[in-house]
Image (cartoon, rainbow, N blue to C red):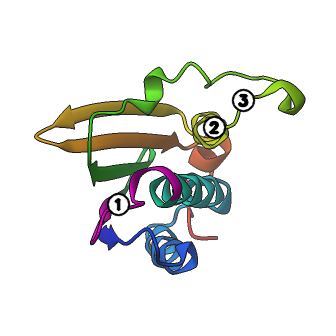
Amino acid sequence: MIISVSPDGPVSNLVTKVSEELRDQCIGPEIANDCYVIIDEFHANMREHVAPGLDGFKWTLSVVAEKQGVVMTFDYPGPCFDPTQNSDIAYQPIESRRTGGLGLLIMASLSDDISYSYHNGINTLVVRRYKTEIDISQEDNPCL
């Protein structure tokens, strides 16, 4: 499933579409809920940090359910910015935390793997959320 997203649109519409796809692919609620939070955080970052002042800005989300879990690919135009190299992705008490980076920390903590690439003006962030042993043990009947 590939969705073109406007950052000024409600994230609830996006989550509803992804929810239907994950349900159709028999992805359990624990993984699905983590995916929704990751999508919400990415959407907020696009709305607050990338899209302001850019007319017609859109980003793309690809969601693929695999045997191992879910792969979400976020593509967006703009200058090269590798969020995986952000030094703020570390635990810090909220009282001493600088503004910014908390969404990336949330995304990193809910995912199993994050990778980044940049090519021809397009940033690509690939986020993977793997099934746990509990999810795999229910593989005989994944749509309980």
- Kindly identify the residue that appears in the image at 47 percent across and 78 percent down: 9
Rendered location of residue 8, percent (x, y): 46, 74
The residue singled out by tag 3 in the image is 98
Residue 101 falls within the magenta-colored stretch: no
First reached walking from the N terminus: tag 3 or tag 1: 1
- Kindly identify the residue that appears in the image at 55 percent across and 58 percent down: 44
Residue 100 - label? 2
Is label 2 in a helix, a strand or a loop?
loop
- Dot 2 and dot 3 residues touching (CB under 8 Å): yes
Image-based side of 142 in relation to 127, left or right? right
Which quadrant of the figure has residue 117?
Answer: top left
Quarter holding the C terminus is: bottom right
Q: Which residues are magenta?
A: 48-61
Mark-to-mark CA distance, 3 and 1: 29 Å
Rendered location of residue 136, percent (x, y): 57, 45
Rendered location of residue 63, percent (x, y): 37, 59
Which quadrant of the figure has residue 120?
Answer: top left
Mark-to-mark CA distance, 1 and 2: 23 Å
Rendered location of residue 108, percent (x, y): 58, 34
Q: Is residue 85 visible?
A: yes
The residue singled out by tag 1 in the image is 61
Tell me which amino acid carries mark 2: Gly
- Say which of 87 and 35 sits in front: 87
Tell me which amino acid carries mark 3: Arg
Quarter holding the N terminus is: bottom left
- Say which of 38 and 79 sits in front: 79
Q: Is residue 1 visible?
A: no
Tell me which amino acid carries mark 1: Leu
First reached walking from the N terminus: tag 1 or tag 2: 1
How busy is the neighbourhood of tag 1: few (under 14 within 10 Å), some, or many (20 plus)? many
| For discs 3 and 1, the disc positioned in front in the rendered view | 3
